Each structure stands twice: as C-alpha cells, then as structure tokens.
Amino acid sequence: MVQVRSTLRFILNDEDIVLDAVSATQTLLDFLRIDKRLKGSKEGCAEGDCGACTVLVGRLSGDELVYESINACICFTGSLDGAHVVTIEHLSRADGPLHPVQQAMVVEHGSQCGFCTPGIVMSLYGLWMRDANPGQLTTEQTLQGNLCRCTGYAPIIRAAKTISNYGAVASDPLVAHREAMKARIRALHDGARVEIGEGKGRLIVPASVDDLAEIYAANSTATLVSGATDVGLWVTKFMRDIGSMIYIGGLKDLQGIHESAEALTLGAGVTYTRARQAMVKCYPQLGEFWDRIGGEQVRNAGTVGGNIANGSPIGDSPPPLIALGASVTLRKGSARRVVRLEDYFIAYGKQDRQPGEFVESVSIPALPKAEQFACYKISKRKDEDISSLCGAFRVRLEGGRVAAATIAFGGMAATPKRAKAVEAALVGQAWNLASVEAAIPAFATDYQPLTDMRASAEYRLLAAQNLLRRFFLETTGAGQRLKREVA
C-alpha cells in the first residue's frame, strides 16, 4: 500500500518549504517572485530561451548531490519535491561581500543593464562548482542558454576564467556544507506519493514507476511532465488547459542507463545531460549534435523520453534515433510492448500510444564499426535554437556499393520520417557522387515540406539534398580533399 502525502516539500536556499496548496501549473519563477518575493530571477522570455530566470536545482544522484542550472520560467513548482532550489539571493547577504562569481563579473565588466546578469551568474556558479578552471569551449557551452543583449560575451567569458581568483570552490557553502544538505534532502524522501488538489488542478507525484503505471492507467487524461521544456510552453505561451499533472522527473526507476554489446538503453526520464556521456561513447558522431540540443538549462531538464513521447515533428532526438534503429518500450499498468521508433509516429500530434500508456525506455542498437553514420542540424542560430531541419544518415557499404541505407529527417513533415525513396535509390548502387546525384530527386517523393517561420519548403528540400551530398563527401574523405584544394 503506497503512503500518500498531501504536501509538497523542498528546500529553497536555506528554508524548508512545505506546501499543501499549489496549482499544478504554477511555475517556479512565479513562486519565487510572487509568493516568496525573491526578485533576482527575471522573466525575459517565459519559454526557457533567454536564461534570465536561471536557478540551480540540487537533487540526489546515488550518494551524490548534483546541482544543475534550469529555467525557472518553465519549471513547475510541483516537480520540485525533495529538491534543493538555489537562487541568486543565496549567494551573498545584502550586507556581505560579493560571491566570487559576482566579484569576477564586476571586475571584468560582465554586466551592463543587468537584467540577464542574475541568470548568467547562476549558470557560471553551477559551472564553477564542477570546474574551477574551465576552458573557453566549456564556458561557451555553459552559457548557450543565457542571452545578453548589451554586454557582449567576451567580458563574461573572462569572468568565468577568473572566478577562482576571488575564492576557493571548497569554501563555497554549497560545497563545504554539502553533507549536511544531503542529509536534509534524504529526510524529505519518505517514499510517499504526493497528491494535492482536485479536478483539473490536481497535482500528483508518484512514489515509483509502478505507482505511476497504476495512477496513469486510471487517469489517462492527465498530463505527464518530466522536464517541462515543452509542456512549460503549453502553459506560459499557449495558455492551454492541460488538466491534472503527473510529475515523473524525480522517478529514479526511469533514470537508468544500461550499456551492453547489443544496445544502449535509456530510461525515459534520463536527461540530455545525463545521457550525453553514454551516447557519445556509443555513437561518437553525435557529440557536436548533442551539444546543440537547447541550452544547458534545457539539456539539464529535458529528457530523451519526453522528446519522443511528445511526438513533435521538430524534436531533435528522433531523426538520429530512427536512423540507428531505436525502439521504445511502452507500458500500461503491468503490460509492456516494444515499438520501433519509426513506427511510433503516426501523424501530426498522434503517436502509437494507447490511453494510460507511457514511454518507459528507449533502446538503441549498437552501431557496427564498419557503418557510416552522421546527424546534422540546420537552424537560424547555431546554439539553443529549434531545428529548421534535422537529418540523420546511415549507410553500410559492401564492395564499394550501398548494401543498406537509412535516412531520417525531422522538420520536413508532420512527423519525423524516413526518406525511403531516397534509400531505395541508393541501395545496390556504387557509393559515388553520381549515385548520390541520381538519388537526390527522390526527396520530392518522400517529403512535401511545409513553409513556416523557420524555413520555406524550397529551402528545406534543398537543404536536405545538400546534407546527403555533405554526408557523401565526409564519408569518402572527399570533403577534406576539397578543403585542402580550396586552401
């Protein structure tokens, strides 16, 4: 029998928070600014894009307490049970000295209007605790999710490199008192299910994945929420009525990563950040691509399973996973079934998922060493931008001919979709430029791209064709030869 608790419990800075009444759609940013009058975190975009609302959230991962930056504007308060939330106000007292991160920003002139500065400071704070002397690339990746209109990033990057000049990481309170905070957080984890409110405003935090399966089977109209990097916008931008919510981001049972010789399996609750090491180890071609999924705050919150479950045609993870032959395990109650990822997407907004059924895990077969694989993202802005087009390519060559080909695109159609006509045109042909050019017209058979704010249909089709050419050049070394000839 699962114990049920009617209060939400977490730690805010150094204060124990206990809430017995909270709206399922209340964002953490509104809770901070309106309920707690903590005005340091700003609302710039309300969609997880600008980073002005960045805070740190600490959660237990095994025996470790890990702090990660997240966007408070699209994080729901109900998802924070058992967590430690740290805001800009916690870094230094009003009458005390500046925190080393703040001092570095002052000395290096890293702030002008100051609106974005609290979020930048929090992102750099999280980085500093992980790496006291970060390199420029690491710093730039950390700041992908923080936009600054007036200062320019050079002073901010200089500040990141000099933080340790003004204090030691070991002396920071979040580091020095970590054991004490771990004990406080452990005390919050009582194994109970949280239920607050009724009807459309009902908030549920399951005690386990088995508890989730039971709850969701009986409440199939509820909205499952993990990182809320998409669902958050349904509330803040589209003002959608999404009914009661079931928060699953804290379920350890959904956060497993299992690697074998045959496949890499990710629990549906594994975030992009946690998945990165295993993904890049097994599929090194995805390293650069993975670092362009959102900004760091989005990767810290968003999950691979959520990206699949939502079924968005512009989700970044489905194209490469389809090309790799991934499958998803769907669960309803105690029953499970496995579906190929390419078959999971049926039509726009429609997936092969029954009422009360949820994505439990995704399994990605190992990539044979002899096969060629690549994934490309086209977007208006290199970092932290939604794909105009995302294409993944995989070929197996035998005797210089294409024995098998898998090509998948997102952003081209109503669903992530394979280019089967192009694949058929390539199979059996010599892997040369003439075969590639002969296959390219088949893209018009596979896709009828849409025109929207991100790209025109003509641009998408041409870009897809050029990406196949790029893949050929890179896999044959012709691209490098061309670069040397041009140089």
Image: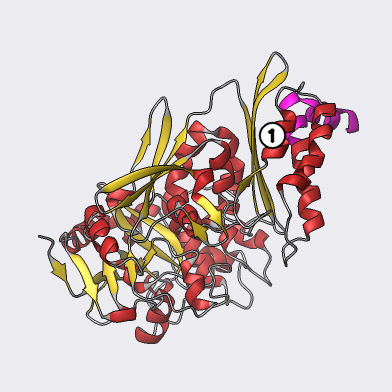
Q: Splitting the image into 4 quarters, where does residue 356 fall? A: bottom left
- Residue 272 lies, with reference to residue 200, above or below; the image says above
Q: Amino acid at mark 1?
A: Glu
Residue 60 lies in the magenta stretch: no
Residue 486 lies in the magenta stretch: yes
Q: Is residue 213 visible?
A: yes
Residue 371: image x %, image y %?
61, 24
Comparing 206 with 382, the one in front is 206
- Residue 324 lies, with reference to residue 41, above or below; the image says above
Magenta segment range?
470-487
User: Circle 1 is placed at which residue position?
Assistant: 423
Question: In this view, which residue lies farthest toward the right?
Answer: 486
Q: Splitting the image into 4 quarters, where does residue 67 fall? A: bottom left
Comparing 352 with 270, the one in front is 352
Residue lying at 27% horizontally and 69% vertically, measured from the top left: 204
Q: Splitting the image into 4 quarters, where does residue 372 fall? A: top right
- Give SS at disc 1: helix
